[in-house]
Amino acid sequence: MNQPKLQKIEEWNEKIMMPVIFVGPILSLPQLYNVWFESHQGVSVITWTAYFVTQIFWLIHAFKYRDSANILAGVLWLIIEFLIILGLFVR
């Protein structure tokens, strides 16, 4: 791939990353709502705990490379995952 085209792709990617960071956690809000206010039947504490643990490793990696986009995404995901896990134990 030629250099100008690659640079355009990288610039485009940088512009869309901040909004995209919020998409995953926002898409998990219905799951969070269901766990806390509806039924949590069929929601696996093992799966969400595994997501939480793996996210910790991703967050450490993001801090190591000072990747602010992935740090923000990691923190948002940890919050969502923690609240889902907590809801599974509390309810």
Image: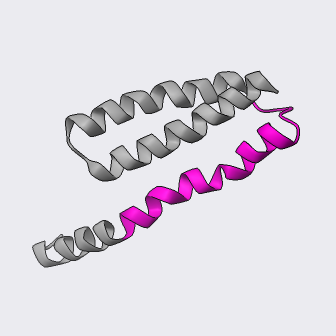
Furthest residue to the left? 3
The answer to whether residue 14 is above or below residue 21 is below
Q: Main secondary structure of the magenta part?
A: helix
Q: Give the percent coordinates (x, y) of residue 15.
A: 32, 72
| Image position of 87 (left or right of 15) | right
- In-front residue for pair 21/47: 21
Q: Give the percent coordinates (x, y) of residue 64.
A: 21, 34
The structure residue drawn at horizontal position 24% and vertical position 68%, both measured from the top left corner, is 10
Locate residue 21: give its quadrant.
Answer: bottom left
Q: Which residues are magenta?
A: 16-43
Q: Give the percent coordinates (x, y) of residue 40.
A: 83, 34
The structure residue drawn at horizontal position 84% and vertical position 42%, both measured from the top left corner, is 37
The structure residue drawn at horizontal position 83% and vertical position 32%, both measured from the top left corner, is 42
35 in the magenta segment: yes
Q: Give the percent coordinates (x, y) of residue 7.
A: 17, 72
- Say which quadrant the C terminus sits in: top right
65 in the magenta segment: no
- In-front residue for pair 56/79: 79
The answer to whether residue 46 is above or below residue 5 is above
